[in-house]
Image (cartoon, grey):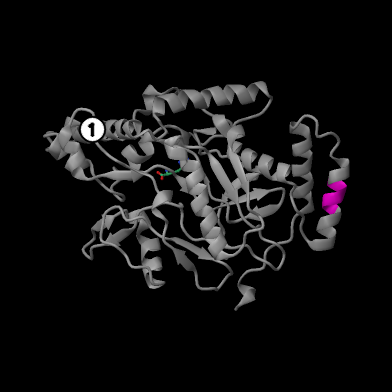
Amino acid sequence: MPTSLFTPAFTDPAQARAFIEQFHAELPGTGDPAARVHEVLDEIERTGSYRHTPEELAFGARVAWRNSARCIGRLYWRSLVVRDLREVSSADELAEECFEHLRTATNGGRIRPVISVFAPDRPGRPAPRILNSQLVRYAGYPDGSGGWTGDPAGGQLAARAADLGWKPGEGRFDVLPLLVQERPGERPQWFELPDDTTLEVPLSHPDHAWFAELGLRWYAVPAISDQTLEIGGIRYPAAPFNGWYMGTEIGARNLADADRYDLLAEVAGRLRLDTSHDRTLWKDRALVELNRAVLHSYQEAGVTMSDHHTESERFLKHVAQERRLGRQTPADWSWIVPPVSGGVTPVFHRYYDPVDPELRPAFLAREPW
Ligand code: ARG
């Protein structure tokens, strides 16, 4: 095995100190950080890294959410359920715990925000990686003439999984297997998701019976699995986390984007809209009906989902609450403003504290091995 591919960095003592000080400053009753800082710096000197206490880990994960400039759903950052799975580093066990994550997060439809934190990178001992971008995602299969069956965003992983021996389906909504790589350069292992981990919602429309015939569906839990959680200089590359969906993510992006399911023309056709010219706003009208269908269907199925009006108000409440606590809320306007009806939501009409790429704890794009 070529170990030279990846040598995890040693933990930066300055990052460690800053985090421990933040932990003690923000949490009442934790007292003077001096003793713990001393202990941590000593551990880094001896071992090249250190171990978070369970409380530090939970706090760090929650603050990483609070710091996520692209997330509109941050009002509930304190409620994140943190699963401490740092002892887990084998592919089998990791897959099993990802399945358990989905069951806990799904909670029969009452979605709970959850993060599962697996083994961190240690000096000379890189942590395992989850290769999927989300724990649940649909496969995409190119049709050879530029079109796709399924989700083009799941094209690469489907091909990779097939190379490893996964038998691809031929459907538009085939749930991808979980791909886990234990060590750099090692062959990833794949695991089919058990049925009881992937609650899905068939899509129907409150006014149009034909909508159900389109055979559309989406999954209940968006669980990001390709971001590294970094806390106090320690990197946790396998730390899948989820919230609940905001309807527009599905209705205005996943099902509508030209490079995703690209369904606007089909929906417009069924609605008998005049598609002869952009000025008829057929795309806009189809988009609204698609979004109504998504919100209606999740509601009918008893699966937590918010709409962009409600989530926008919650976000501004979060910004105000943070401000009262003397904290900024860095936010990326282009991600916060919803992809439909921006101007009729309050988040459109203002700017936000600047995004600082150095802010920690944070979720970071996963670096390659
Ligand atoms: N936009 C992504 C998707 O449609 C999910 C991103 C996270 N979303 C969330 N509500 N936590 O699958």
Question: Residue 73: in sight, yes or no?
Answer: yes
Residue 341 percent coordinates (x, y): 34, 28
Note whether 87 is above or below 27 in the view shown. below
Note whether 85 is above or below 179 in the view shown. above
The amino acid beneath tag 1 is: His
Magenta region: 37-41
Callout 1 crowding tier (Cα within 10 Å): few <14, some 14–19, many ≥20 = some
> In the picture provided, is 123 more to the left or to the right than 283?
right
Q: Which one is in front, 156 or 206?
A: 206
Question: Residue 350: in sight, yes or no?
Answer: no
Q: Which one is in front, 193 or 222?
A: 193
> In the picture provided, is 252 more to the left or to the right than 105?
left
Query: Which quarter of the rendering shows the N terminus?
Result: bottom right
Residue found at the far bottom of this picture: 1
Label 1 residue SS: loop
Some atom of ligand 1 lies within 8 Å of the CB belonging to the residue at label 1: no
Quadrant for residue 253, please give it: top left
Q: Is residue 341 magenta?
A: no
Residue 347 percent coordinates (x, y): 46, 26
> In the picture provided, is 300 more to the left or to the right than 160?
left
Q: Main secondary structure of the magenta part?
A: helix
The count of marks equals 1
Query: Which quarter of the rendering shows the C terminus?
Result: bottom right
Residue at the disc numbered 1: 205
Quadrant for residue 11, please give it: bottom right
Quadrant containing ligand 1: top left
Residue 281 percent coordinates (x, y): 20, 31
